Amino acid sequence: MDALDSVVDPLREFAKDSVRLVKRCHKPDRK
């Protein structure tokens, strides 16, 4: 399972960044 974890972890990080980026694009921050 270690090999799987080494693949899944970067994917999860990438997905998190993508979601943050998409949200920022759709909702420009208003302060």
Image (tube, rainbow, N blue to C red):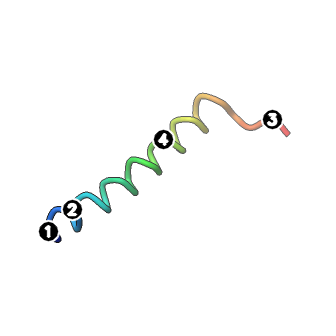
Q: Residue at x 54, y 44 (%)?
A: 20
Pointer 4 local density, CA inside 10 Å: few below 14, some 14–19, many at least 20? few
Q: Where is residue 24 in the image (x, y as percent from the top left)?
A: 61, 38
Residue 9 placement: quadrant: bottom left
Mark 1 residue type:
Ala
Pointer 1 local density, CA inside 10 Å: few below 14, some 14–19, many at least 20? few
- Is residue 17 rendered to the left or right of residue 25? left
Tag 2 residue: 7
Pointer 3 local density, CA inside 10 Å: few below 14, some 14–19, many at least 20? few
Q: Helix, strand, or loop for circle 1? A: helix
Distance Cα–Cα, label 2 vs label 3: 36 Å
Mark 4 residue type:
Val
Q: Position of residue 1 (x, y in %)?
A: 14, 66
- Is residue 29 rendered to the left or right of residue 4? right
Tag 3 residue: 30
Label 3 vs label 4, nearer the camera: 4
User: Which comes sooner in the sequence, label 1 or label 3?
Assistant: 1
Q: Residue at x 59, y 28 (%)?
A: 26
User: Which comes sooner in the sequence, label 2 or label 3?
Assistant: 2
Q: Residue at x 38, y 53 (%)?
A: 14
Distance Cα–Cα, label 4 vs label 2: 19 Å
Label 2 vs label 3, nearer the camera: 2
Q: Helix, strand, or loop for circle 2? A: helix
Question: Is the residue 6 above or below the residue 13 in the image?
Answer: below
Q: Are marks 1 and 3 in contact (CB under 8 Å)?
A: no
Query: Residue 19 shows which numbered tag?
Result: 4
Mark 3 residue type:
Arg
Tag 1 residue: 3
- Is residue 20 rendered to the left or right of residue 8? right
Q: Where is residue 4 in the image (x, y as percent from the top left)?
A: 16, 62
Q: Are marks 2 and 1 in contact (CB under 8 Å)?
A: yes
